[in-house]
Each structure stands twice: as structure tokens, then as C-alpha cells.
Image (cartoon, coloured by chain):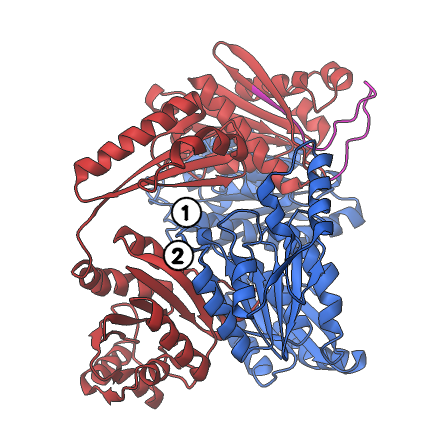
Chain colours: A red, B blue
Amino acid sequence: MNAEIIAVGSEMLTPERVDTNSLFLTGELNNLGIEVVEKHVVGDDRGRLTRTVRRALEHSRFVLISGGLGPTEDDVTRDAVASALWRKQIFHADISDAIEERFRRMKRVMPEINRRQAMVIDGAEVLSNDRGTAPGQWISAGDGVVVLLPGPPYELKSMFTRECLPRLRAMVPPMVIRTQVYRISGMSESDLDQTISPIYKVYENPATTVLAHNGDLQVHLRARCETESEALALLADVGGRIEAALGDKIYARDSSTLEEVVGRKLRERGETLSVAESATGGGLAERITTVAGSSSYFVGGFVTYAVRLKRELLGVPAETLEQFGPVSAETAAAMALGAREKTGSTWAVSITGNAGPTADEPGANGIGAPVGAVYIGIAGTKGTETHHRVWPSSDRPRVRAFAAQMALDMLNRAIG
Amino acid sequence: MNAEIIAVGSEMLTPERVDTNSLFLTGELNNLGIEVVEKHVVGDDRGRLTRTVRRALEHSRFVLISGGLGPTEDDVTRDAVASALWRKQIFHADISDAIEERFRRMKRVMPEINRRQAMVIDGAEVLSNDRGTAPGQWISAGDGVVVLLPGPPYELKSMFTRECLPRLRAMVPPMVIRTQVYRISGMSESDLDQTISPIYKVYENPATTVLAHNGDLQVHLRARCETESEALALLADVGGRIEAALGDKIYARDSSTLEEVVGRKLRERGETLSVAESATGGGLAERITTVAGSSSYFVGGFVTYAVRLKRELLGVPAETLEQFGPVSAETAAAMALGAREKTGSTWAVSITGNAGPTADEPGANGIGAPVGAVYIGIAGTKGTETHHRVWPSSDRPRVRAFAAQMALDMLNRAIG
């Protein structure tokens, strides 16, 4: 069972915009066992769209079209699909009345051009839009189906879920989808793939996807079977071997983020956390506080960007800064200790490093920290530890993101 | 002059991935006056790709294809394009030798399958790849041109810039492109568009694009003329009227970010900055320190997430916190004053607010801050000012991003 998705709109042919509706639609179709085999973006051009629809229908059973259902001359989808299927359009007075009523409720008068939205292709089923004026259409054509959906994602998602999913489910053999997510930190994407691809590559079911974002990795397994027990057995088999291969590199067996995992542990234990950052400039605290409710364990932090503030706010000894430099294990340890002391938190994490783009000036020790050098300090009830890494990158945002990821990973391991 | 872009690769037909090469290519083609009229994504399927290439060439002069040039059986682009054009492929020993040499330099032996990358479509010009093994191909076919480019963006961009741009320039009438960027803060996207669309809507040249990201707005004007003076005159005309309509909402007349504009002013005056954040949790400091060299004016900051740290680290009076609550103009002012004093900076900005998802508990004053309520404090040489806004959103990341944007905007206006 194959589908093609067509996004309509000249704005999606500019250098700034991508079509994202197709990602949502692909996920939903895949869950039904329908594969998306081609995607297209066509401008507001009746002739091109007519050709694209006709060709898609020649080779795929389902053709989903998003956008171009508005009231203006630029909205060509209805006309193009009618041409592609050699059908006429019929004015539906009830749709026009409903649109007029919608305008009335917003205390506005319906412009005359909105009547165009009440034109329905002969033989189409009308799909209701509970979030906008443009109704959708579901058209059976031979063995195929053409579906017209509105462009705004908020409208499209609701219409697809309410109106299309039940119709599609009735057309495909019933299947059960079960997924397993692993979240991983502390290894590179290529190391991860080398470790687990021998396991997952031999299976088409479950389907495996590896996602990577600044050192934060995810493995998604998706099993699609006739029964739930079959699906769960497949996941247990492949997932079990992946777990054995990755060990403690896995920090979550669901979609929890690393900052959520850390937060959950702290909350359970009634412990608190503070941070002291230099290179990441607030990015670590920002990430920790993306979690709603983080105020119950995160007390606060320091961004000590100027060297003197490491001394003045955190109490890092002047000799430490002078002898080892601000980017050093010794300074990282002192920063974490200082943050813990000043805030009274159970745990404190520090980051100092050089995110680039240029190497630091050599300090009293004659050594300037190279770009990508990062030191992490963690202070807790049992003492202080430090970790060190040099990223082979002079990409400032990337070094900063990797440093924050490493700090959270180390903290998570330290908490245990 | 029209172009179609085809991205090849089954991974781009999953719910997780979009093709972004086409954005870069569209920008470059538009600069030459070539319009992109359709975009396609096709999986690793020889038959479907052959059909898509043939159809694209029927209706567009330029067909650019990215991806599918690797050495494996899944890499079908060479074969599909050869079929689409009814041409054979020829083995190029020099390409094979160059790939082998590349492997040798990396101390590896070239796998036999990599010889496939040395197959060149009859009549094609070979496009060198200085960042990977897969060479590209430039094929004239009748009036049209088919271009094969590698999938990795890093390889594609270099190949396109070095090999394709000069060839395309020789085929299109010479045109001069000049652009004008305005960056705007302190108004909503819809207010911006209502203000300036009556000005820009009447022109096709310059082309106008409005971009919005969490309260940070941009207007791009792109004039395309036969001479530079014509282009500059068009930009001066339309741009001048946009500037008059927007006044001091414009914070930059180039692509500078708000944090860069603020940083430049501070550096010129030899002034320094610190921050004290609550609701944004480090996000304001993080944004300020995205600017390389920000350490010359940004000294550091405080993330006082727990109420008691507002008192202990910033010296906000207990009475202020009790009487007005931690989310209040009075607390925002005291936070900014405290940060300025503790760090000795010229300027200090504070943010306190409720980013959601739930309303704060009512404090001693009986009032709990509603979701979206944000107070900004700015302390400088001439005293302290505060600003207040309630965003009609319970989307935590959005409220936080808007709050940081507002704080930077207010600081920029205060600096003057």
C-alpha cells in the first residue's frame, strides 16, 4: 500500500520554508502500514498541480494533498484535482452557509470569494474542518483515493485524525504497532551505529531509526504485527540485544530527556542542584529549567564569564586561576564546590572551557586552552570529580551544546 | 527559466527527516533569476526516480538531483538518470584511481563496490568533489540540463558553488542582485505585516519576505535588476518607506542579531553587562554569549530560580519578595540592582516571570502570577526601569523565548 504526498503553495518553494505537514502524515500513514514513496512540493500553479496529481495516482494508491484550499485565485487545489480526475465541481449551499455562520460568530461578514470554498468535486465526501473555514475532500477514483487537506498544520492534523484515519483504517488490514525508545549519551553517533547496526540491520520488522542531536542519541524500534504479543516479542528480542550491547550508555528506556531523568532522580531523593557555567554561558541552566516543575530541585546558578567573577562569586582561589588557568580541572572543581557552598544545594555542576572560535591567550602557566577544550566539575555529598574532553570542532554553538550534554551525562552518572 | 529539484533517499520519506539541500539550492538558483517550480523526494527506487527525472525534464529547463551517488546497490541515481535519458554509462579509470587514492590517504583499502562511483553517463561533464568520494555530473539533454549532486550538504554546497554556479551564470542573462535586511523587535508579526504589506505588496521587484522567530522579526528585500544602480534605487525607494513606517522598531539594517547589536554598542563604549534570571533559567545569558567575543563586555550572571537565592545572591529585600511576590516589578528592579552591584557591571538586566505551565501559588499578597506574566528590570548608570507583559500562551519554551527577546529589546532601547 503506497502513498504520495503533495504540498501545495509557492511559499514552500522559497529558500526559507519547508513542508512539515508531510512528516506528520508520513508518521500516521506508516502506523497503518502505508508507505510513503514520493513527496512533492508544487507552487500555486493549476497546470503543474493537475499533472502531478494525475501522475501520482497512476503509481500510488493514496494521494494526499495539503494546502491550496483557501478562497483566493491563488488557491488552485480544488480546480487542479477536478481537472486531473476529469470531474466537475458542485456548489454546496450548506458548506457556504456554515462558512458564513463562522464569519458571523467572529462578527465579520463573509467576503464573496469565500463561496469558492463551498465548491466540491463531483463524488467527493466532504471532510469537516473544526479549526478553519476550508473543508477537506475525500475522493475515490478507481482503485485510488485522493484526499484534499488544508495547509495550516493545526487544521490539517485535526481533520486527518478525525476524518481520514477511520476511513483509512477500514481500508487496510488491521495491524498493531508497538514502539520502544532508547535514549543514549556518552558515545558518538558512529560508535552507536557500529555497535548496534549488526543487531538491527537484519530485521525489517521492527524498523529501527537512529537519531542524533549534539551528543544526545536516540534509537527507535517500531514493530508492526498482527497481534500485540507478536509485536512485544519482537521488541523484547531486538531491544534486549541492543540493551545488552549498550549497557549504561542508555539513560532512558522511554522518551524522557536527560534533564528529565536527572530531575526525576533528584525529586525522588529530595536533593537539589545548582550550576556554575563559563563556556556554556547559561545554556546548562537553561536546559535544566526547560523541565516544567524543575524549580522543585533546581535552586539556581552562576554564569561566571569574566575570570574575576569566578573568584568573587564562587570563591575560586586566585592561585588556582593563576597556576592552572580558568580552563582547567582545578578551576572546574573549585567552581562546582563554590556553587554548592553558595547555594546550599546537594549537587553542583560546573563547566569551564573554550567554545571558540579562537584559542585562549596563554595564562601564567604558559598554556592557552585550545578551542573545544571543556572541563566539567561535579560536587556532591561524597566529594568532587572532574572530567575533561577536547572536541575536534571550532563550531562555537556545537562545542557549547556538546559541553552541556556531557555535564548532564556526568551528573546523571554521579547521582547514580 | 525554471528548475525542479529532486532529493533522492528513502530516509527522507520517514517521519523524522526533511530535505534541506533544496533550500540552499533554491536560494542560489533564485539569485541567478532561476525559479524553482517543483520539488520532489523519491526513495532509493530506480523506476520511480527514472520517471520523476523524465517528467521534470519535460517541463523544466534545469533538473537538480541530490543524493544517491554512493557506492551501494541502494544508490540508484546514476542508473536512473541514464535510463531517463536513454544513455549508457562509461567507466572512467581516472575517477576510480582518484577514489582509490583518497582511501589510501585515509590508510584504507577501497572496497570493490566503490568502482561504481566511477561510472559516468555518456556525454556528462564530471563535477569534482573536494569533500567526499562521489563525483557529480552535469548533463546537457536537448534544451535542458540534469545535474547530479552528492547528498551530504557539506559536499553538495562546495560542489555546487565551485562547479555549477559558473556554468549556470554563463547560461542566464547577467543580473545584479542586491538585498536589504531589516531586523525588528517590539511588535508582533501580524502588526508588522499589516504595517508594511501595503508598501511591499505592490512590488514584484524587490521581492519581500517576512520572517518571524519568537518575537524577533526580519524583513528581507531582494532587488534583481540589470544594473547595480537600478537595484539600489529600488531598495532605497521601498526600503525607505518601510523604514519610515517602522521607525525605532528596527534595531538593525543588516543581518546582525539583537545580541550582536547590544554587544557592539557596549564594546564601543567600554561598558559591561550582567544578568539576573528566574523564568528564563539561563536562556538570556546563553543568548548573549552566543556572540563570539562577548567576554569583552558580558561579565556574567545569576540564575536565581529558588526564591531564597534572589535574597541570598542578589540581595533582594525579604520585604519586597513578601509584599509584591517574586514575580513583580519591584522584585525585577531589585534583581537588576543586585546583579549590577554584585558584579560591578555598567548595566544589568533581570527577568522574573511565570513561564508556565501552571499559575504560581498565591503569595502573601494573595496574588499568584498568571502563566505568561513577565517582568523585566534594567539597571544602569541613570537608575532602574521595569517593563511588564503577559503573553497569552501557556507554552513554556515560547514564553521563555519571548521573555528573553523582550529583555534584550528593552536593554537595547535603554542603552540608546
Q: How many marks?
A: 2
Confirm or deny contact between disc 1 and disc 2 (CB under 8 A).
no
Residue at position x 32%, y 65% in the image: A156
Q: In the displayed structure, would residue B50 be above or below residue B106?
A: below
* Span colored in magenta: A357-377
Q: Which residue is mark 2?
A: A23
Q: In the displayed structure, would residue B409 be above or below residue A396?
A: below
Q: Nearer the viewer, residue A293 or B220?
A: B220
| Amino acid carrying mark 1 in the image | Arg
Q: Which residue is mark 1?
A: B396
x, y percent for residue B325: 42, 40
| Amino acid carrying mark 2 in the image | Leu
Q: Classify mark 1: residues with Cα within 10 Å, few (<14), some (14-19) or many (20+).
A: many
Quarter of the picture holding the N terminus of chain B = bottom right
x, y percent for residue B219: 61, 69
Q: Is residue A248 visible?
A: yes
